[in-house]
Amino acid sequence: MQANFEEFVVARGRALLRFAYLLTGDGYLAEDLVQEALLRSHRRWSAVERTDNPEPYVRKAILHLYLSWRRRRSSTELSYAELPDRPGAEQPPDAVVERDAMWLLLRQLPRTQRAVVVLRYYEDLSDADIAVLLGCAKATVRVHAFKALAKLRAALATQPAVMGVRHE
């Protein structure tokens, strides 16, 4: 059991950390979420590893920890963590500005809406898969996605230079 858990952490740890980082926007908070989810998963690892793929179980644990994190004091702290997948020097400055602006807009979304956007557009999950992770109906996922996209569009409309959008 211990060897299988360690192999899983070595093999999938970076992907889990990236997932948590996309949700939180904070590298340290993402590490805390992954660590807590792995700790909880380790306690039940014999049952978890009986499934063909334990990663969805751990991702769901990370997601639920993220959604309930607001009750913890650290969730109110502001972070200026680096962007995920930092752009290289070969990218034009405008691309860096646009990426940073979108990241700031995503951080303003409510947790569930942000989770839906991350799961749909960064993790490429279907509405059905997102619904299973969130424990809700597919229609609820679509409502969260609709509201999140509406808020992002509204924010872009009020910031015409952001994301290459120009209103004249």
Image (cartoon, rainbow, N blue to C red):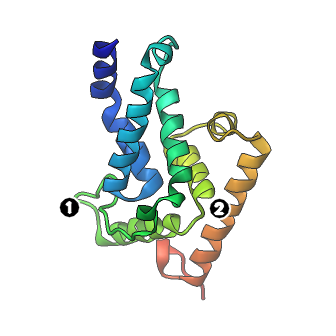
> What residue is shown with label 2?
148
For residue 38, which quarter of the picture? top left
For residue 29, which quarter of the picture? bottom left
For the residue carrying disc 1, how many other residues have a C-alpha within 10 Å: few (<14), some (14-19), or many (20+)?
A: few
Q: Which residue is at 65% across, 75% downward?
A: 154
Is residue 3 positioned above or below 55 on the image?
above
Nearer the camera: disc 1 or disc 2: 2
> What residue is shown with label 1?
89
Alpha-carbon span between mark 1 and mark 2: 31 Å
Is residue 8 positioned above or below 83 on the image?
above
Q: Which of 165 and 13 is in front in this view?
A: 13
Q: What residue type is labelled 2?
A: Ala
Residue 165 drawn at (x, y percent): 54, 75
Q: Which residue is at 57% across, 56% downward?
A: 114
Q: Which residue is at 44% across, 64% downward?
A: 73
Is residue 132 positioned above or below 165 on the image?
above
Q: In this view, does 23 lie to the left or right of 35?
A: right
Q: Which amino acid does label 1 sit on?
A: Ala
Q: Is residue 91 left or right of residue 150?
A: left
For the N terminus, the image quarter is top left
Q: Which of 131 and 42 is in front in this view?
A: 42
Please give the label number shown on residue 145.
none
Residue 89 drawn at (x, y percent): 20, 61
Residue 98 drawn at (x, y percent): 41, 69
Mark found first going from the N terminus, 1 or 2: 1
The total number of labels drawn is 2
For the C terminus, the image quarter is bottom right
Q: In this view, does 63 lie to the left or right of 1?
A: right
Is there CB contact under 8 Å for labels 1 and 2? no
Residue 99 drawn at (x, y percent): 40, 65
